[in-house]
Image (cartoon, rainbow, N blue to C red):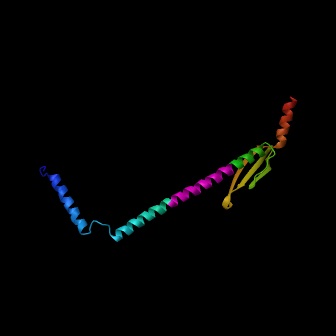
Amino acid sequence: MPPLTRSRALGELWTHHDRVRRRNGEGAMTLLESVVAFVILALVGIACLDLSRGAAQLERSSVEWSRAVALGEAALAAASVDAPMTVASGVVVQRAPWRDGVDRVDVAVNLSAGRVFRMTRLVPNRDVRTRSAVNGAAR
């Protein structure tokens, strides 16, 4: 048998102490400790579920926003060059004179929950573009 060292003696003392505690029932978790552990685990689980729900909601909102921006940009580009365009449902395009030789094009895309994405662009008036094209061709 190896000589008894201080660390070995402390290890044997702790081992003996653990055996005595288990024999007396002190080593097991109490009902209160189990309930507290379960409540903490449940709260962490609920927090994780709430985070994933929030992430999914943000992803849906991001997809809707991207769709609205794409529709608005397409409608604005078509209205800027006087191209015929089939307007998607929920997209409203308005063109009105703003100042001499400039028109104001407003595009509104309806989103869910009553929200609206709006874009505005100033474009040359149709008559100004026609006159500049005719003057350029006459030269």
Q: Which residue lies most toward the top here?
A: 139
Q: Is residue 87 above or below residue 113?
A: above
Q: Position of residue 28 (x, y in %)?
A: 30, 66
Left or right position of 68 against 2: right
Left or right position of 31 against 77: left
Q: Position of residue 19 (x, y in %)?
A: 22, 63
Residue found at x 63% / y 52%: 63
Left or right position of 75 against 65: right
Residue found at x 45% / y 64%: 43
Residue in the foreground of this view, choosing between 94 and 128: 94
Q: Which residue lies most toward the right here?
A: 138
Q: Quadrant of the C terminus?
A: top right
Residue 31 in which image quadrant? bottom left
Instruction: Count up the numbered dots.
Output: 0
Magenta segment includes 109: no
Q: Which residue lies most toward the bottom here?
A: 31
Residue in the foreground of this view, choosing between 112 and 133: 112
Residue found at x 72% / y 54%: 108
Q: Which residue lies most toward the front here?
A: 1
The residue stretch that appears in magenta? 49-69
The prevailing secondary structure element of the residues shown in magenta is helix
Q: Position of residue 36 (x, y in %)?
A: 38, 68
Q: Position of residue 17 (x, y in %)?
A: 20, 62
Residue in the foreground of this view, choosing between 28 and 91: 28
Q: Is residue 109 above or below residue 35?
A: above
Residue 127 in which image quadrant? top right
Residue in the foreground of this view, choosing between 52 and 70: 52
Magenta segment includes 51: yes
Q: Is residue 57 above or below residue 70?
A: below
